[in-house]
Amino acid sequence: MSSKQHDYSDALSKSILFFEGQRSGYLPNDQRVPWRRNSGLSDGWTHNTDLTGGYYDAGDNVKFNFPMAFTTTMLAWSVIEFGELMPPPELRNALVALRWSSDYLLKSVSQLPNRIFVQVGDPIADHNCWERPEDMDTPRTAYVVNAPNPASEVAGEITAALSAASIAVRSSDPGYSQTLLQNAVKTFQFADMHRGAYSSNDDIKNDVCPFYCDFNGFQDELLWGAAWLRKATGDESYLSYIESNREPFGASENVDEFGWDNKIGGLNVLVSKEVIAGNMYNLEAYKASAESFMCSLVPESPGQHVEYTPGGLLYKPGGSQLQHATTISFLLLVYAQYLSRSSLSLNCGSLSVPPDHLRRLAKKQVDYILGENPMGLSYMVGYGDRYPKRIHHRGSSLPSIVDHPGTIGCKDGSVYFNSTEPNPNVLIGAVVGGPEEDDKYDDDRSDFRKSEPTTYINAPFVGVLAYFAANPSFS
């Protein structure tokens, strides 16, 4: 395991650049990933709606609005908490990355109050092909939910995304900020009025599950959306919503998780600021849960703890380990910021934990991802000397249109998928799924749980890297 000073500024710029490799739609003249071209230009046509744009969420060519909205929320939260620490060019790039998805989400909710789009692209057909986004010939089905059918988890997360984005762009583009907020309010009304999961809709169930069903239920997204609306508007009605619905929505259970399908950990941290900074003691239960979560991450504290691998990576059962490392590192840093501003420490039973201890825990995760791990491997593509070369990503693994102008059909890409050669196009900044609980990683394109990057791994990492780029000597 190597130990060295990392170039967090370089990692930050690369973590943002990654999103340009995931773009769908018409690419702008200043596109910085040269091997990508326009794609998905007919998205939405079957509904006479423009659904171009947004991001492919991972190594496939489908636009799943649920994780894309979470990605958007986390990009926005990264800017809200750490944007002032970013060098101006990188803050600008982060806002561009944010707007690429928020523009798309606005299109997804453009037919409310009665209709919301939740996905573009048939995932079964897409996953049976290995082709570039530019060559897609699989159905670009636009999946829609019409009232009174529910889609609370997707609509709740889009509410959070648009609300958070409205805060992030408020100073640079107040008009756009207002548009985002107006649509967030409208989206929340749909989410709350027609309560239920979109996976309960027989028309779309088979094509949204098992890919991005919310196995945790939809209630956390309703609270999450309301909490972000409260932060964006200051409206007391959202305050009473998150206060009165905490118990009935099951948010009182201690949850040591935060990601695209479980918002409780992030919700508790976000709302705890109201208590720490605003003396909103009627929300004390949220802060108590946030403290419990933070304490579970501190190995020295009494009580139950989350698991770490022998090499020090935060571990949760299931694939794509690094999504937990990036989201939870983000929460550690945000909670440390909240405590620091009020000159407080974290109380874990008899143990008092200063904010810097939480920052050190986050830094261990960051340094692990950037190469301080038993494999001596950076899990960010293009960062450091050794990084994954055979990532599970169609556009990266197939020759670009520049090098191979002819179409590569659905099954014609299989030869590249099965190749042991490194990917011809380097998706700079992509953070892959990462190792298993034994810290082992095989650079294998077919092992998607380890080798596939996702937008929701990278989005919180942007904020985390911004903090350490601004505080490189923190230890």
Image (cartoon, rainbow, N blue to C red):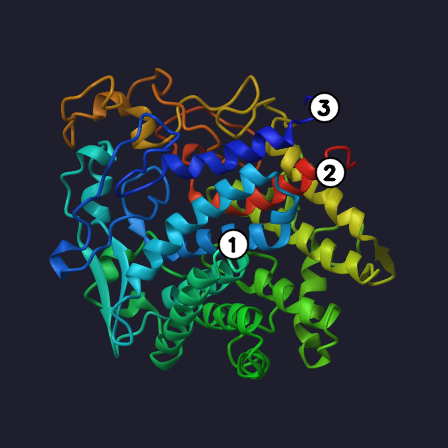
Residue of label 3: 3
Mark 3 neighbour class, 10 Å CA radius: few under 14, some 14 to 19, many 20 or more: few
Disc 2 residue type (three-letter): Asn
Circles 2 and 1 in contact, beta carbons < 8 Å: no
Query: Where is mark 1, residue-wise?
Result: 172
Give the image location of residue 196, x and y in percent: 35, 74
User: Residue 39 is drawn in which quadrant?
Assistant: top left
Residue 221 in the image: x percent, y percent? 46, 68
Asked if residue 441 can be seen in this view, the reply is yes
Q: At 44% from the left edge and 24% from the top edge, which residue is drawn?
A: 443
Q: Quadrant of residue 266?
A: bottom right
At x 65%, y 71%, the residue is 286
In this view, the residue in front, 207 or 177, is 177
- Placement of 307 over or under 230, stated as above or below: above
Location of the N terminus (image quadrant)? top right
Q: Residues within 10 Å of mark 1 (few under 14, many from 20)?
A: few
